[in-house]
Amino acid sequence: MQNALFESALGIEKPLIIEETRFDKESGELHIQINFERGGKFSCSCCDTTDLPVYDTKDKTWRHLNFFQYRCYIHLRTPRTKCDDCGIRLWSPQWGRPDSGFTMLFEAFVMTLMRDMPVSSVGELVGEHDTKLWRVVKHHTDEAYEDKDFSEVTQVGCDETSSKKGHNYITIFADMDTKNVIFATPGKTAKTVGRFAEKLPKHNATAKQITEITIDMSPAFISGVKEHLPKASITFDKFHVVKLLNEALDNVRREEQKNNPLLKSSRYAFLKNPNNLTAKQSLQLESLTSMNLRTAKVYQMKLVFQDIYRCMRCPEEARLAFKKFLVWADRSRLDPIRKFSKTVKKHMDGILRYFTSRLTSGAMEGINSRVQTIKRRARGFRNTDNFIAMIYLKMADLKFNLPT
């Protein structure tokens, strides 16, 4: 009766039979020994050949879901078959994949926990070393990722993020329509774009179908896109462009502050947008902009520049507005602003592309923030492969072929 109950619960079918169930009270473990009927026949694990006699056997063990609070292990005298086409092969039971050491239900449980918990915490909860758990995660994320279809992807975002302390980065590509991560790779060079282009054919896509991409003004990304994504129009993120102007503004403020103590502690009053200021910062800004300060002049230039993005509706209108702004910037006689003007002129086509594509890196910044949260919660990763596997698990909308 007891064996029949476990056979039903585990889905054991003939020729397999449960030979023994043994509970070890001292260790708190339940062991289920499975065997097969004499004369039982099995299928080849590599092809569709069935009804093969048993060649010999090999003892295998799998960790299963806990039985109440007790660990449960399945032991099988696993048959090996001799196939005319494939040779001698170890038969694969339906409850576990080869060389895993865990049943599929246990792995499904682990994958569910890993979505919301650091690997170290999952390891403590299930009583397994995190190295074994990482093998489970990488196997299933790799398998699910390989099944992803990118045939509809035409607009992508690209941004780098730090993977650990020091100059260690990974580059992330995301579908700008679904906001899902579609590729992550170590580094932040032109080669990262090349790796992305090489990956596309494996997912029913081609580099030529990518018609829009938003990036920052990194020379490496620019050259990589031009070489490996020949049909992609580049949009330079407007927030990145405004950030460069903010840096120029802050450089002017720092220089002027040396001779004007009123500018001390005013950095955020000038860098924030007016609707984000505190009451104290609003009063401070109102007082400073009423003075004849170079910083106040550049602040007004920043507001005008932002209004171009906010108000212009087509590329030609924006081009004329930017042209007027650049004349104003060149006449300012302020080196940081002149430098910003040269940058805008050099990248004008990509800046203007925003008024056609309307792409920004807002989604990429959101992804970057979530990636850094993953890193902080895990307190770092031993290697980049683990980090990328976790990014795919949480942000690539993967579909897992796991039992529920």
Image (cartoon, helix red, strand yellow):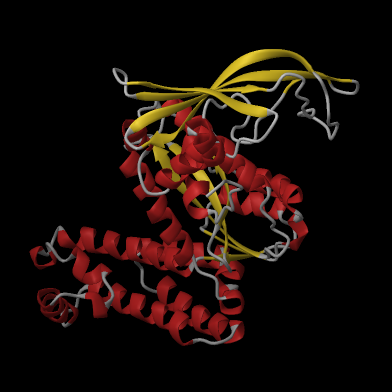
Question: Quick one: 321 or 127, which is closer to the camera?
Answer: 127
Q: Position of residue 328 (x, y in %)?
A: 42, 78
Q: Is residue 6 left or right of residue 53?
A: left
Residue at 44% x, 47% y is 112
Residue found at the very far right of the displayed protein: 84
x, y (%) of residue 252?
Answer: 27, 63
Is 154 in front, or is 236? 154
Residue 262 in sight in this render: yes
User: In the image, is 144 to the left or to the right of 370?
Assistant: right
User: Is residue 169 visible from the viewing direction of this image?
Assistant: no
Camera-side residue of 293 and 135: 135
174 in relation to 197, above or below: below
Q: Residue at x 16, y 66 (%)?
A: 266
Q: Position of residue 365 (x, y in %)?
A: 43, 60
Residue at screen point 29% across, 59% down = 251
Using the rendered view, name the quadrant where residue 66 is placed: top left
Would residue 378 be found to the left or right of residue 343 on screen?
Answer: left
Query: Taking 77 as reference, is 359 above or below it?
Result: below
Give the side of residue 88 with respect to residue 91, left or right: right
How many numbered circles does the render carry?
Answer: 0
Residue 83 versus residue 379 in the image, above or below: above
Residue drawn at x 65%, y 31% is 93
Q: Position of residue 69 (x, y in %)?
A: 32, 35
